Amino acid sequence: SPASILSTKSDCKSYSLAANGILDAIRRNTGDNFEIAYRFASYDPLDSTPQHVFAVINPNTNNEIWID
């Protein structure tokens, strides 16, 4: 649950799920038109295996908003 994620030690997966869950609830309740997504990142340029995830808002412009 979001309360559990926010009250305990969590990782990037938990925080990105909570962030996009909250954003999806806002979108559904307000009718705002924006997209939400996840982005995956690797810290090693020689290894493309994802090591990090974060939430992204795309407000239907050319500018994404990263929530990390």
Image: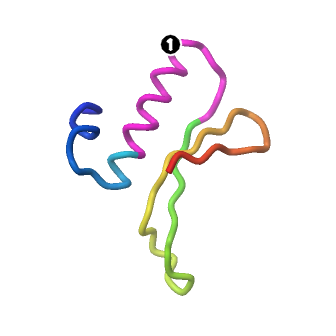
Q: Main secondary structure of the magenta part?
A: helix
Across and down, in percent, residue 30 comes to 56, 12
Residue situated in front as seen by the camera: 68 or 50: 68
Amino acid residing under circle 1 = Asn
Across and down, in percent, residue 18 comes to 37, 38
Across and down, in percent, residue 53 comes to 45, 57
> Mark 1 — residue?
29
Callout 1: SS: helix
Callout 1: few (<14), some (14-19), or many (20+) C-alpha neighbours within 10 Å? Answer: few
Residue situated in front as seen by the camera: 8 or 61: 8
Across and down, in percent, residue 10 comes to 27, 51
Does the stretch in magenta take in 24?
Answer: yes
Residue at the extreme top = 30
Indicate the quadrant containing the N terminus: top left, top right, bottom left or bottom right.
top left
Please give the name of the residue rendered at 50% of the width and 72% of the height, measured from the top-left corner: 42
Does the stretch in magenta take in 54?
Answer: no
| Residue 28 higher or lower than 13, as above or below | above
Number of labels in the image equals 1
Q: Is residue 41 left or right of residue 63?
A: left
Q: Which segment did they paint magenta?
A: 16-35
Please give the name of the residue rendered at 26% of the width and 40% of the height, measured from the top-left corner: 5
Please give the name of the residue rendered at 49% of the width and 75% of the height, measured from the top-left corner: 43
Q: Is residue 45 left or right of residue 64?
A: left
